[in-house]
Amino acid sequence: MAENSLRPGLTTVLLLLMAWWATTNATTFEKFLRQHVDYPMTEAPDTQRYCNLLMKRRHLATNKYCKHINTFVHKDVPQIQAVCGPAGEPTTGDLRESNMSFPLTVCKLQRGSWAPECNYMGTSAVDRIIIACEDGYPVHLETEVPDY
C-alpha cells in the first residue's frame, strides 16, 4: 500500500516538471521574438531613429541599461523558425546557420552613450543568421554571416 500512495505524488511532480519545462521553452522563444523579430518592419525615417525606437520599445534600452548591440530580423516567424529545421544547417552545439539570407537591422550603441540616454546607430544588411534552437524553436541569435 505504501508503494501505491507514492505513485500519485510522483506523477504530480513529473507533470509539474514537464509543465515548467514547457513554460521555460515558451518563455525563451518569446524572449527571442521580443528581442530579435520585427516583421513587418516598423517604419522610421532612418536606421538611427529605428534603432532608438525599437531598443526602447523592446526594453533593450531602459533608464538603467543600454544593450550594446542587437540585431532585428525582418522576416515572418515561420521562416525564421524553419532555420531550426530544413532551412538551416547544424554548426556547433545547438547552433544552426540559415541557408538563406534575411533582411536585418543591426543596432549598435554609440560610443559615449549611457543610460538613460541610449543612442544607437543602425545598419541595414541582408545576411544569413546563426541561431540557437531548442526543441525546434529559436532561442538565441548568435550572429549574422555576411554574404560575400
Image (spheres, helix red, strand yellow):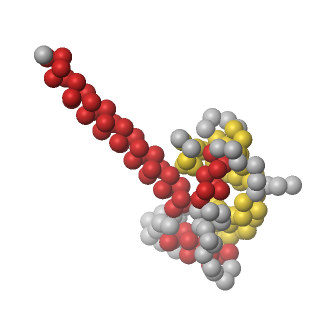
The residue located at (21%, 29%) in the rendering is 9
Quadrant holding the C terminus: bottom right
Residue at the left extreme of this rendering:
1
Quadrant holding the N terminus: top left
Residue at the right extreme of this rendering:
148
Q: Position of residue 23 (x, y in %)?
A: 39, 47
Q: Position of residue 60 (x, y in %)?
A: 51, 64
The residue located at (14%, 17%) in the rendering is 2
Camera-side residue: 77 or 60? Answer: 77
Mark count: 0
Q: Is residue 86 above or below residue 144?
A: above
Please state if 11 lies on the left or on the right of 68 as rendered. Answer: left
Give the quadrant of residue 10. Answer: top left
Please state if 1 lies on the left or on the right of 86 as rendered. Answer: left
Camera-side residue: 67 or 11? Answer: 11
Q: Can you see residue 109?
A: no
Q: Is residue 97 above or below residue 62?
A: above
Give the quadrant of residue 7. Answer: top left
Q: Position of residue 47 (x, y in %)?
A: 68, 75
Camera-side residue: 39 or 145? Answer: 39
Please state if 146 lies on the left or on the right of 31 as rendered. Answer: right
Q: Is residue 75 above or below residue 23?
A: below
Q: Can you see residue 56?
A: yes
The residue located at (69%, 38%) in the rendering is 90
